[in-house]
Image (tube, rainbow, N blue to C red):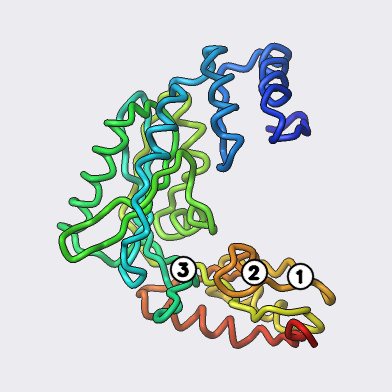
């Protein structure tokens, strides 16, 4: 349970590290875990390593950062997010999640489907690639989200980050498998290894794909929220708010999460929810 909210400037590395050290001493903290991403990761890890409060050295995170592939991977290549949890140096694959996209020409991400509809042999090859990468990096403890492109000659790792997947992927796993990745991260700090059941259904998150502009009116959110197959929904906008264009990360703030027996059914249900949301958005420049 959280006991205190501490505010700091992530751009001030010395101040950030001093805050971590002071907080660790004050509360007798055993482990420091960075749950996000961005420029604050390495300063936090460096201080936690200096204090002996993380099993992962800063070099581990640096190795993971440089593993990124270049941009020559075709945009049309299907991509899969692989969630893992490492406990005492052993890497456990929790599940694989497929990206939904707009298709050609831009292939903007429009949502995610769990589990990814892949045959068993492909899953095994992907799992080996990801585990080998984590092992080579020296990663000892914590979650990781690895993005993999599926190319004709085999899977290729695009990026690997030491945190849970975003875009509500942990919720999709919980719905599909009855396994809570967020709770498993904290259990893993106590040495508990994850036991993940096979998926009993599919879960999909779909972004509402609103056009860029100024939101004037909207309806339908109440109906979406009470639909039986909807497992979560968010519409954080109010009249007058600016909506970022599709393809911008900020456009993913509004979404719906659905469940279904097949990937085709979840796709249809996401489309139904998108139709139920009716918005009037004034385009830029008008």
| Residue 189 against residue 76 in the figure, above or below | above
Q: CA distance from mark 2 to mark 1?
A: 8 Å
Q: Secondary structure at mark 3?
A: strand
Residue 71 or 1: which is nearer the viewer?
A: 71
The structure residue drawn at horizontal position 80% and vertical position 84%, both measured from the top left corner, is 217
Q: First in sequence: mark 3 or mark 1?
A: 3
Q: Are marks 2 and 3 in contact (CB under 8 Å)?
A: no
Q: Give the side of residue 239 with respect to residue 43, left or right.
A: right
Contact between labelled residues 1 and 2, with CB atoms less than 8 Å apart: yes
The residue to which callout 2 is attached is 254
Name the image quarter holding residue 275. Answer: bottom right
**Relative vertical location of residue 196 with respect to residue 150 in this rendering, above or below:** above
**Would you call the spot at circle 2 few (<14 residues within 10 Å), some (14-19), or many (20 or more)?**
some
Give the image location of residue 184, x and y in percent: 46, 38
Q: Is residue 117 above or below residue 281?
A: above
Compared to 280, does 12 lie above or below? above
The answer to whether 55 appears left or right of 154 in the picture is right
CA distance separating discs 2 and 3: 14 Å
Along the viewing direction, whichever of 219 and 242 lies nearer the viewer: 242
Name the disc covering residue 237, or none: 1
Residue at image position (47%, 24%) is 58
């Amino acid at each position: 349970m959280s006991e205190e909210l501490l505010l700091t400037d992530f751009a001030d590395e010395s101040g950030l590290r001093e805050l971590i050290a002071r907080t660790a001493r004050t509360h007798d903290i055993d482990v420091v875990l960075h749950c996000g991403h961005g420029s604050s990761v390495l300063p936090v890890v460096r201080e936690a390593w200096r204090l002996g409060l993380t099993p992962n050295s800063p070099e581990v995170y640096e190795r993971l950062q440089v593993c990124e592939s270049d941009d020559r991977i075709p945009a049309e290549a299907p991509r899969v997010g692989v969630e893992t949890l490492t406990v005492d140096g052993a890497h456990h694959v929790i599940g694989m999640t497929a990206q939904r996209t707009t298709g050609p020409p831009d292939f903007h991400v429009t949502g995610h489907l769990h589990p990814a509809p892949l045959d068993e042999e492909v899953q095994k090859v992907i799992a080996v690639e990801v585990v080998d990468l984590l092992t080579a990096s020296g990663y000892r403890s914590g979650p990781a989200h690895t993005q993999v492109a599926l190319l004709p000659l085999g899977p290729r790792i695009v990026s690997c980050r030491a945190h849970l997947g975003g875009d509500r992927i942990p919720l999709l796993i919980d719905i599909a498998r009855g396994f809570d990745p967020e709770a498993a991260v904290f259990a893993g700090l106590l040495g508990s290894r994850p036991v993940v059941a096979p998926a009993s259904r599919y879960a999909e998150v779909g972004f509402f794909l609103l056009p860029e502009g100024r939101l004037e009116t909207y309806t339908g959110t109440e109906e979406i929220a009470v639909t039986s197959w909807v497992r979560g929904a968010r519409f954080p906008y109010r009249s007058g708010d600016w909506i970022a264009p599709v393809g911008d990360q900020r456009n993913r703030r509004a979404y719906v999460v659905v469940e279904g027996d097949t990937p085709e059914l979840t796709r249809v249900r996401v489309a139904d929810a998108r139709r139920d949301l009716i918005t009037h958005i004034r385009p830029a420049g008008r």
